[in-house]
Image (spheres, grey):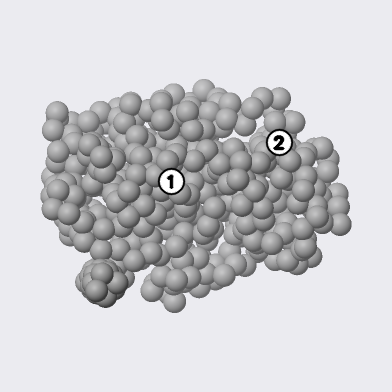
Amino acid sequence: MPDPQDPISAPKMSRRKWLAAGGLSLLVACGALAFHFRAATPIADLTSAHAPVPPPIVLPTKPEDWRGRIDYRALDQRLADLTAQHSMEGLAVAVVEDGRLSFVQGYGLTSAKDGEPVDAHTVFRWASLSKTVAGALTAKLAADGLLSLDEPLDTFHTTLRLPRDAQRELTVEALLSQRTGLPKNAYDDRLEDGQDPAVIRHALGDVPVACAPGRCHTYQNVAYDTITEILATRTHEAYDQTVQRRLFQPLGMTSATIGQAGLVGAAHWARPHREGRILPMSEAYYRVPGAAGVNSTIVDLAVWMQAQMGLRPDVLPPAVLDSAQRPRIGTAAPYGRAPFAREIKHAGYGLGMRSFTYRGHRVIGHSGAVSGYRSTMMFDPATKTGIVMLWNSDAGLPFRFQAEFFDRAYGLPFTDWLDLKSVSDRRLAQARHLRLRETDEAG
């Protein structure tokens, strides 16, 4: 599974543009949408095992419900323009401002072939954003005394073998902060070819090292998913059951599931796309659920972001969040190909969680990319303001939009990070070049 890229996009057909510009006005026409969502003021005296599902509230899907410092009407128009690009299909967005859910909107379609409009009920894949769940869950179980982050991996008798038997000394903390010493994305190709993750993990012992274990950050999926084996040895249940019982159910994330069946079994789910074409579903990365197995609606992803902001201490106490979010090692700036990457400084990686500064402000989150799906969650822990986005294409443009969002949130002058005109011009130039080449070949 590659790191999120930034492919070229171009204008969509008129039907897509019309849907994008309309946003969710089509989608919640039946009136106020009642949906579980946590209030900004948490109930601190509940245990995570018994925290009730919050009462339903009206989601801010209409302009009259958009309140805050951010100009949400301008934000909505910008997102509509983004979704009208050729590389896009559907997009769901939610904003939390000052800890309060302030904006929920859907754009485009769930499928290029007779698809429904994307709305607050549409289920997408999280892809690698799922790593934040594994990291937070491990920190939570460590706080509960079920394991120690300092325990060597060999203690758990997993299928992972590292070069020079480094699993004998490498800790759980090092595994989740991507410090295995393996080459980046080691044997992802074997996973995509259908091999059993347990078999692949055993074979990792024979690969050349990128660095001494614990000394550098090299992003992994197959190795990272070893955490599911580790947790199962202490909880005595499957990883997805532990996630549901300890996190999703207490948070009221009723749409959140782990595995392909949870996606395709949803009443309203987004199909994967590339450049307007529907792609076949791929199960490969669902077989490493700790790395990339989660699905949900945009609202439940916003619930997860609120919990990461510290608004649900009954489920994720401050010490657990600090453990999960605190960077253990420096990394290259994420979104390295995007224009706004030059504004990113001090990038680091915690337990399945990235952090960096953007124009002087600390930002926390993660993104994800699998075939036909992308995802991102980024928030400022100081202001408790952030954005989550889920979309069903390989497009990279929404990653750029995060920078525009934070510029608006911080009251900074507008910077055209999306650069949609340039994107469209490049797309048209490519199309003209292709037509000329076809004409030459025909002659």
* Nearest the eye: 198 or 366: 198
Amino acid type of the residue tagged 2 in the rendering:
Glu
Q: Which mark is residue 116?
A: none
The residue depicted at 25 percent of the width and 40 percent of the height is: 113
In the picture, the quarter occupied by the C terminus is bottom left
Give percent across and percent down for residue 357. 48, 68
Amino acid type of the residue tagged 1 in the rendering:
Met
The residue depicted at 68 percent of the width and 48 percent of the height is: 223
On the picture, is 118 further left or further right than 281?
left
On the picture, is 434 further left or further right than 358?
left
> Could you tell me how far apart the alpha carbons at marks 2 and 1 are, in whole angstroms?
26 Å
The residue depicted at 36 percent of the width and 48 percent of the height is: 273
Q: Quadrant of residue 32?
A: top left
249 versus 317 height, above or below: above
Give percent across and percent down for residue 371. 45, 49
Give percent across and percent down for residue 269. 34, 34
The residue depicted at 53 percent of the width and 28 percent of the height is: 244
* Nearest the eye: 371 or 239: 371
SS class of the residue under badge 1? Answer: helix
Q: Which mark is residue 229?
A: 2
User: Tag 1: Cα neighbours inside 10 Å, few (<14), some, or many (≥20)?
Assistant: many
226 versus 45 height, above or below: below
345 versus 78 height, above or below: below
Q: Which mark is residue 305?
A: 1
Query: Are dots 2 and 1 in contact, CB under 8 Å?
Result: no
Say whether residue 94 is visible: no
